[in-house]
Image (tube, helix red, strand yellow):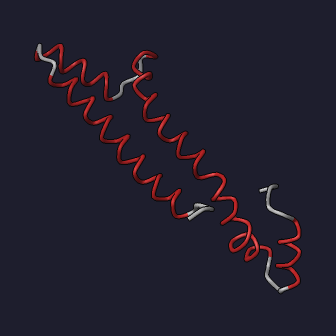
Amino acid sequence: MQSVDAGQSEAAQILGLSPWQTFRHIVLPQVNKKVIPAMGNEVINLVKDSSLVYVIGLGDLLRAGNIAMARDVTLVPLLLVAVIYLGLRAILTWGLRSVERHYSYYE
């Protein structure tokens, strides 16, 4: 939020905007343009790294797939887990890309 020019806040005060209106209509849209791409990358990385939770020992989708694979002696559960992870990542990537496009400086 420090990257927003102080002159813009001063101009909003001169125009009679309240601090809340200044934040909502002037500061927040500019902050979103800079923050959303980085936040999107973090969300996608969290989804990708969630399978690492299995290594730590907490239950997750990969652990459920391994249990089902051991029970059924087939690779189908792990393939389904891979498809779920791929689908989830694709949906998040598509959604975040559309949000980034909405807030893009250049379009």
Q: Quadrant of the N terminus?
A: bottom right
In the depicted structure, whether residue 64 falls above or below residue 101: above
Q: Quadrant of residue 21?
A: bottom right
Residue closest to the eye, 88 or 54: 88
Residue 40's x, y, as percent?
53, 46
Q: Quadrant of the C terminus?
A: bottom right
In the depicted structure, whether residue 101 falls above or below residue 7: above
Left or right of 65: which side holds 94?
A: right
Left or right of 7: which side holds 70?
A: left
The residue lying at 38 percent from left, 40 percent from top is 89
The residue lying at 47 percent from left, 39 percent from top is 44
Residue 39's x, y, as percent?
58, 46
Residue 94's x, y, as percent?
40, 51
Residue closest to the eye, 8 or 64: 8
Q: How many marks?
A: 0
The residue lying at 88 percent from left, 70 percent from top is 7
Left or right of 32: which side holds 22?
A: right
Q: Residue furthest bottom?
A: 16
The residue lying at 52 percent from left, 64 percent from top is 102
Left or right of 23: which side holds 59?
A: left
Q: Quadrant of residue 63?
A: top left
Q: Residue furthest front?
A: 106
